[in-house]
Structures are given as structure tokens and as C-alpha cells.
Image: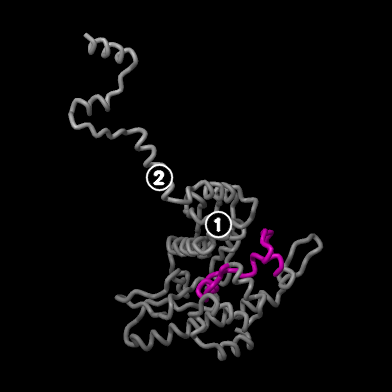
Amino acid sequence: MTNSALLWNKSLSPSVLYLTDDDFYDFIKKQLGYHQSRLLEIQKISCTSVFLMTDDICDALELDIDCKELNDLKEELCFKLKDGSFIVRPGIKNSFGCLKTVMMKLTEDKLKEQSKRKNPSTTTRTDLVSATINPLTTTSSNLTSTTTNTSTEINVVEPLPPSTSQLSIDDHKQYLLNLLKQWFLHQKENLKLDKLDFTDGIDFHLNVLNNNNNINATIVCNCGILIKLPSKDGKIQLSNYYKHLRDSKCLHMKEKRKKNKQITPSSSEKGSTEQTVTNSVTPTPQAPSDTSLLQSTITLSPKRKSTASQMSLS
């Protein structure tokens, strides 16, 4: 941790870990600046937990997204290249990274403190979060340790333990799937997929391999593109796949958005339609006798109708 981060850590209260909405944005504005706060607000990163689990806060600035507010921010937070694209200023990226590191350290200290206070004589199963692990979130104001008989208050995703070499391939895969699930939940509105979900084996295929004790992972999108997932400090990063899903060229995302629009928005309309179909197909006469009921439910062909009329007249 840098010297500035150490000084920052001493000035921040652990209460910042529980900030949400306007309180969270005001905190970011005070620590980093107005434009950084707006960047988080536009992306709906509205609490400390989501902030910590987002791999690259500035990623959206370098993508070709049709958003006027985001484009205005690019002028303040990015360099414009000659080809018209943008690259985030290094100071902006580093400011987010420094703050994230400090808040991770606060989380780690908080976990250690509560672990000692709650059960000092019992070995806990809590996986303390290191400064490089991103996906840690907490609920409200209860951040507790996990013992053998006690459930944890960590809400979104359980972080990887410090020694990833002890994890199986299935553990690594489940960890990444949990990250993807939470990311989709928070990005549904931005991706315009509020009525659909993403599923491994249908929308994408996650592959995790152990190559001489080096964990390698790839994702094959349903559009046919293979995305290699980089590793940083022993942790697999999903940012490349996130970029691909935001890319307007992904054919699978175009198809998903099309299906999302076709889903009936109102269940009441669906119920009304079903009722109309039922009434038109299955008549329910109120005849008192069995004979009249039989007549109302049997459909006669024209020829048989004529024969029946003649019999009646005779």
C-alpha cells in the first residue's frame, strides 16, 4: 500500500463500508471529486459493496456507449485520441484503485476485530479479504465472522481464501459463476435485459483448467467468441467478458435484447388474454337439464344437422 493510502486509511472510519445511495455518492465526491462521483452514479454503483466488487470502474469510459451523460464525463476524465476514441487519465484510475485498496484494508481489519471479539478461542472459517480481492459486499451494518455453526452476513459473494492453491477446479468455477451472477443482477438495467437471466451452458460456457498449478479460465459466449480471462495476483479477472457483453457487436446480446422486448410487460394483460381464449373455446351453458347440456356441447356437422331436423319434424 502506498504512503498516501496509509494516510487515507487512518482518516477513514469503518462506517464508510455501509454507505449507500446519496451518502455514498457524497463520500466519493468528498474523497475523489464530483466527476468521479457522477461516473459511479451513472453506472448505478450505489453502495460500498458494489463498488468493491466492480473490477474496473472506468471501463465504461473507454467503450462506445450511447449515453450523453457518460460522453460528457469523458471530456473531463479521459484523453481523446486522434482516432476519436478515449483513454482514461491515469490519475483517475489510480484514485479509484487507491480508495478501493483502503476500503479493502478497512474490511479486513473489521473482520479480524470482530473475529477476536466474538469467539477468540475457536478457530473460525472466515476467509479474510486481502487488498487485492474485489468481490466483497456486506449487508446493512452487520459484518460478522463465520464459525462452524454460525452463518455469515456477507450477502453477495464469499471471497476466495488467501491460498487459492487449496481450492478445487469446481470451487474456482463456482466462485466465478457467483461473481457473474451478481454482476448480471446489478447490470440488468444497463444491458437492457431486465426480464431475462444469464445461465452457464446456455448463454455462455465457463471453462476452468489447472495447468501445472496455474489456474486458467476462458469463457465462450453463445455468439461463438472465445474470451480469455486474465489473472491478477492469483485471482481470475472477468473484465474481458464484461467488455464483450457491453460490445454492440455481440450477436447473442442483440438476440437477448430482442427477446427481452418481446416478453409481455404486464401479467394482467396475459391473464386477460388467457381468459378470452378460454371463454371462446369452452362454452359454459347454464341449462338446467342434462339433455340441453348435451346439446350445447356437441357440435353437429351440416349434414347431421339436416337429418336431425327431419327427424324432429316427423
Please name whichever residue, 76 or 148, is drawn nearer the observer in this view of the structure.
76
| Residue 263 position within the rendered picture, expressed as x and y whole percent measured from the top left | 49, 48
User: Helix or strand or loop: what does disc 2 sit on?
Assistant: helix
Q: Residue at x 39, y 84 (%)?
A: 115
Q: Is residue 201 above or below residue 283?
A: below
Disc 1/disc 2 C-alpha distance (Å): 46 Å
Outermost residue, top side: 314
Q: Is residue 226 above or below residue 30?
A: above
Q: Is residue 26 visible?
A: yes
| Residue 270 position within the rendered picture, expressed as x and y whole percent measured from the top left | 42, 46
The disc, 1 or 2, on the residue closer to the chain's N-terminal end is 1
**In this view, the mark in front (1 or 2):** 2
User: Helix or strand or loop: what does disc 1 sit on?
Assistant: strand
Q: Amino acid at mark 2?
A: Ser
Q: Is residue 207 left or right of residue 307?
A: right
Q: Which residue is mark 1?
A: 218
The residues colored magenta run 44-73
Q: Residue at x 56, y 63 (%)?
A: 238
Q: Is residue 108 above or below residue 214?
A: below
Q: Please say whether residue 125 is one of the residues in the magenta stretch.
A: no
Q: Quadrant of residue 77?
A: bottom right
Q: Is residue 30 left or right of residue 138?
A: right
| Residue 136 position within the rendered picture, expressed as x and y whole percent measured from the top left | 48, 73
Count of number-bearing discs? 2
Q: Quadrant of the C terminus?
A: top left
Q: Which residue is mark 2?
A: 272
Q: Residues within 10 Å of mark 2 (few under 14, many from 20)?
A: few
Q: Main secondary structure of the magenta part?
A: helix
Q: Amino acid at mark 1?
A: Thr
Q: Residue at x 43, y 77 (%)?
A: 140
Q: Quadrant of residue 75?
A: bottom right
